Amino acid sequence: MAKKKKTEETVKKVQDPNVEGLHAEVVEQAICDTLELNYMPYAMSVIVSRAIPEIDGFKPSHRKLLYTMYKMGLLTGARTKSANIVGQTMKLNPHGDAAIYETMVRLSRGNGALLHPFVDSKGNFGKVYSRDMAYAAPRYTEAKLDAICAELFRDIDLDTVDMVDNYDGTLKEPTLLPTTYPNVLVSNNTGIAVGMASNICGFNLREVCNTAIAWIRDPDCDLLQTLPAPDFPTGGEILYDPLEMMEIYKTGRGSFKVRARWRYLKEGNLIEIYELPYTASTEAVIDKVAELIKAGKIREINDMRDETDLSGLKLTIDLKRGADPEKLMQKLFRLTPLQDSFPCNFNLLIAGMPRVLGVREIIEEWTAWRTQCVRRRVYFQLQKKKDKLHLLKGLGRILLDIDKAIRIIRETESDAEVIPNLMIGFGIDEIQANFVAEIKLRNINKEYILKRLDETDALEKEIDELEKTLNSDNRIRALIVKELQTVAEKYGCERKTGMIYDHETILQEEPDDEPDYPVTVFVSQEGYFKKITPQSLRMSGEQKFKEGDSLCFSQQATNKSELLVFTNRCQVYKTRCSEFEDGKASQLGDYLPQKLKMEEGETVLQVCLPGDYQGFVLFAYENGKVAKIDLSAYNTKSNRKKLTGAYSDKSPVKGILLLQQETQVALYSTEGRALIFSTAQLTPKTTRASQGVAVMSLKRKSVVRKAVLLQDTAIVNESRYRTRSLPAAGALLKDEDLEEKQISLDV
């Protein structure tokens, strides 16, 4: 193997401009070495020690805060000032007070960011659904641990988890918290590290516990039966797709849609929105609605205001007379954060390594970890009972001959010889002798002796049971199941987030509430677009165009008609007539490259009205090839505004014709030839970028200059230019066939 070269560091002396005669040393280092030596440790620290949660569901900042509160006695004691908690936490978490307090805010009941908060708060802790509502300073608020934290710290003093030194070695802190339920799936958690991130949605506590129990009993169980979907503290409704959810459960990645809940109050003709998606805020919703009203895209709203109070969230919308609340909400779901997608990325630290896990894998990892915790607890209890039994057995030997023990102690001259003499006299070890020597004189009676002997028998039975448990995986798992059942019964609650199945929602991808009426569209050669109603058209005079511009084509349509705008960059832009304001003949119209936000230098080649996408588009290229593309290739289910690769880029396009049925087309070349062919001679393609087939044979330095529908040409001798087979060269144009008609693309 070749030895790895070590980059040499170069030391330079640079004059310090502030001090005369003083030079500073500057070390030059290769960038790859800088990344490896300086940046990589930082990146690993962020990933392992800051941003990514572990199997207990906590990041280090959460764990340090909660453990500090536990050691302060705030699990059973009264609340204390948040500032006091923040200050104590700094002994474990060497960060600023603001960062620690923000962590507490998110874990608090008052903020509402978690289904099961860990901090019982008093005072203003802000709200998760508000972007601008600031939480009060820590000197004003109070906090203690919530009751559910008893499940986080249960058995933590029984050696269930490893304890390590804090940053200065003065205190001990746990590496993980021995949670008795899969908190990693119950609590929402988001983290952004270096080069990776984590975004875990919360699930209902009772459903998670039942799912963990079902998995322990059968690892191949159907997760959707017990864990149908995530649950959020802000409520809302999930647009539920079982296949989509199963994919998230399987891979740990994906997204699902969540929308707000609302009700219509007929008395005041208003809508009340009382639950938002977890990712939305009231301010963002109001700002977006105001923007839509200003742009004229929403005309049904008189006023919208935030009426949130102590009873909870409430956004009120005053409707105009005659407005349909159902249709308005569908539009708001489509255009505002009232409906949003929640992206899932179940990235966890497992044994110090980041891994993206599915739900089944998370439950498997948690069960394995929890099994280890319970096993350590049982072993700890077993050792304690064995130690106690050892002492009692030594006591039992002495209690059989109390007089002998008293005589040994009385006849011993020095205090230091009492223990050795007891050890020799009764054959016990030093620990047992010390225990016996500390017994009070009043306890040397018959009742005390009998109780100790009975306790010895009970201890032996308990030790036997603990040893059986320690050696049995089934017993360990039974303990875990029992704890999960207890947690589900004690802390479980009903789902807050509802589920709407596909057949129950009327939400549509395409806008269906725009008014529809007949219009006539006009497109100029330079790409100006007008949409004129029949009434306005009857009252108008001559169409106005920019100097040097002229009409390309006009066609009757409706306000909801779709438009396909082909450009010189092999792209097609999709839009609707409703996106343009009604115009007049005296106006220039909308400039399509600007309206559709085309790229710099991009120009319009052709505008088509595809209707129901039946038919085909004909592309005639400069090299004599013609492509017949099925119009359905441009029909997309999603609201895509631009399609790249609209046609082949192998040769410049010289004609784009939208045809609903087979017809005849004339090709003209630069050498004065024309060729008439039937589109039925070409096979339609579904691939938009197809290069087509050769139709016109061209001589050297000759190219196709245009393609025109036969009905729009001045050709009289049609048979002269027809051919039975393709490709063909066509025929030279006669004088009587040279005159051209006004080109129109009406179909």
Image (spheres, helix red, strand yellow):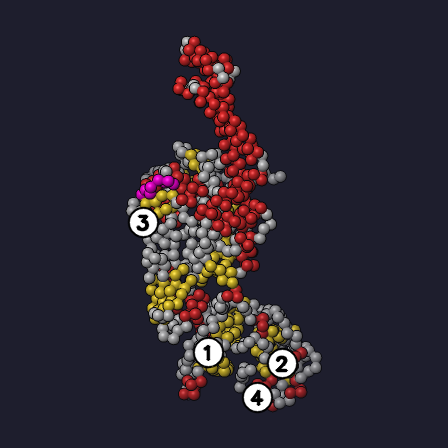
Q: Position of residue 126 (x, y in %)?
A: 34, 53
User: First in sequence: mark 4 or mark 1?
Assistant: 1
Q: Residues within 10 Å of mark 3 (few under 14, many from 20)?
A: some
User: First in sequence: mark 4 or mark 2?
Assistant: 2
Q: Are marks 2 and 1 in contact (CB under 8 Å)?
A: no
**Cα–Cα gap, marks 1 and 3:** 53 Å
**Cα–Cα gap, marks 2 and 1:** 30 Å
Residue at horizontal 48 percent and vertical 74 percent from the top: 576
Q: Which residue is mark 2?
A: 662
Q: Which residue is mark 3?
A: 123
Q: Position of residue 316 (x, y in %)?
A: 35, 65
Q: Quadrant of the C terminus?
A: bottom right
Name the image quarter holding residue 42: top left
Q: Position of residue 650 (x, y in %)?
A: 60, 69
Amino acid at dot 1: Asp
Looking at the rendered structure, the number of numbered marks drawn on it comes to 4
Q: Residues within 10 Å of mark 1 (few under 14, many from 20)?
A: few
Numbered badge on residue 516: 1
**Cα–Cα gap, marks 4 and 2:** 25 Å
